[in-house]
């Protein structure tokens, strides 16, 4: 009986180690995947907020320039129209 146990104990230990590795590896992978998917929405929201700030900041000068341009052109057109009406 002793010889049988001495012969099978290393094999049983190896099988138990392999089984624990097989169980541990997917659990570790699941934790990593879970961490990625829980941080993903937060990270995406942060990136969207940054992009919004960048685009809003870039759009504001164009909007201001457009309103100033349309105002100055509108004033000049009105002056020209009034001048033309004055000639009639």
Image (cartoon, rainbow, N blue to C red):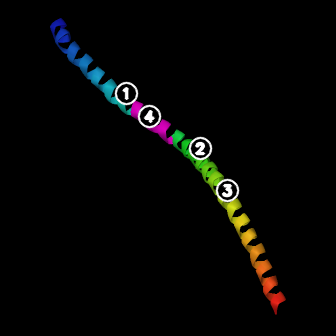
Q: Earlier in the sequence, mark 2 or mark 3?
A: 2
Mark count: 4
**Residue with the most extreme right position:** 86
Check if residue 30 falls in the magenta segment: yes
Q: Residues within 10 Å of mark 2 (few under 14, many from 20)?
A: few
In contact (CB < 8 Å): disc 4 and disc 2: no
Q: Earlier in the sequence, mark 4 or mark 3?
A: 4
Residue drawn at 74 percent across, 69 percent down: 72
Distance of label 2 from label 3 (alpha carbons): 24 Å
Check if residue 18 falls in the magenta segment: no
Identify the residue position indicated by label 4 in the image.
32
Q: Where 11 falls versus 44 (above or below)? A: above
Q: Where 58 falls versus 36 (above or below)? A: below
Q: Nearer the viewer, residue 83 or 28?
A: 83
Q: Earlier in the sequence, mark 1 or mark 3?
A: 1
- In this view, the mark in front (1 or 3): 3
Distance of label 1 from label 3 (alpha carbons): 56 Å
Q: Where 38 falls versus 2 (above or below)? A: below
Q: Quadrant of residue 62?
A: bottom right
Horizontal side of 58 relative to 71 (left or right) equals left
Name the dominant secondary structure of the magenta segment: helix
In contact (CB < 8 Å): disc 4 and disc 1: no
Identify the residue position indicated by label 2 in the image.
46
Identify the residue position indicated by label 1 in the image.
24
Residue 61 - label: 3
Image coords of residue 86 (percent x, y)? 84, 87
Range shown magenta: 28-37
Task: Tell me the element at label 3.
Answer: helix
Q: Nearer the viewer, residue 12 or 79?
A: 79
């Amino acid at each position: 009986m002793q010889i049988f146990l001495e012969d099978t104990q290393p094999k049983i230990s190896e099988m138990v180690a392999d089984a624990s590795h097989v169980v541990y590896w997917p659990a570790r992978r699941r934790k990593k995947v879970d961490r990625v998917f829980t941080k993903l929405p937060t990270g995406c929201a942060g990136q969207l907020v940054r992009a919004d700030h960048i685009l809003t900041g870039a759009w504001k000068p164009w909007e201001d320039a457009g309103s100033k341009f349309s105002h100055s052109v509108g004033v000049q057109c009105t002056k020209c129209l009034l001048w033309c009406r004055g000639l009639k």
